[in-house]
Amino acid sequence: MSRIGKMPIQIPRDVKIDIKDDMITVKGPRGELKRQINPKVSLSIDNDTLLITVKDDSKESNACHGLFRALVANMVKGVSKGFERILEIVGVGYKAEISGRKATFNLGYSHPVVYELPKGIDATIDKSKITLTGIDNELLGETAAKIRSFRKPEPYKGKGVKYAAEVIQRKAGKSGARD
């Protein structure tokens, strides 16, 4: 059995979980998320805890057990507290602007990169720091990865778009001196 899957999920007071047929709906102060329940797992609610159990003991079921528990735990945390990803823009002349739902990035190309933020993701830009917030952890991570892919950090000077906690391994440049 999955060690992560066996852990119960604590449900905060302001979060409501509704299980109908093969859908789980999690409602909280920040919004509502829905997910289809994997047929290899079953859900049960006891007081303030949600337990996820497997229906059989196959290898695939054990793999789905921990994954589905993590996904549901992220749903509960998302509707109660929300998630945040911070990106940094490093480079001379590299900048970003936001207007409405569109973010415009000037990243050293001959043209600006315009990206429309998905529904449910909000962004704030402060100089060279982009803060993305949302309740859906998967969508938030996907959006952050998409923005980072516009100009990945290069290993020589570290220019590009990087996660705030990311450490760029630097390479030595050309030696310049010849024998």
Image (spheres, grey):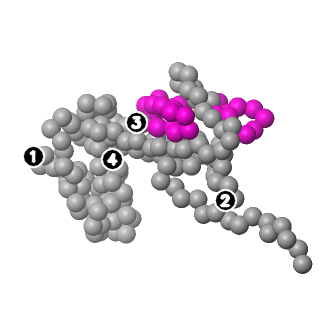
Residue type marked 3: Gly
Residue for point 32% across, 60% down = 65
Dot 4 amino acid type: Asn
Single out the mark in the foreground, 4 or 2: 2
Q: Identify which amino acid the numbered label 1 is placed on.
A: Asn
Is residue 115 shown to the viewer in this render?
no
Task: State the SS at label 4.
Answer: helix
Residue corresponding to mark 1: 47
In whole angstroms, how far apart are the C-alphas of marks 4 and 3?
12 Å
Tell me residue 114's x, y (percent).
65, 30
Residue at 49% x, 49% y: name it.
164
Q: CA distance from mark 2 to mark 3?
A: 30 Å
Residue reaching furthest to the top: 100
The residue beneath circle 4 is 74
Look at discs 1 and 3 and give the one toward the viewer.
Answer: 3
Question: Relative to 68, does residue 174 appear above or below in the rendering?
Answer: below
Q: Quadrant of the N terminus?
A: bottom left
Distance of mark 1 from mark 4, alpha carbons?
19 Å
Between residues 93 and 55, which one lies in front from this camera angle? 93
User: Which range is magenta?
Assistant: 105-132
The verdict on residue 87 being magenta is no
What SS does tag 2 mark? loop
Indicate whether 70 appears above or below 116.
below
The residue labelled by disc 2 is: 155
The quadrant of the rendering that contains the C terminus is bottom right
Name the N-terminal-most of marks 1 and 3: 1
Residue 109 is one of the magenta-drawn residues: yes
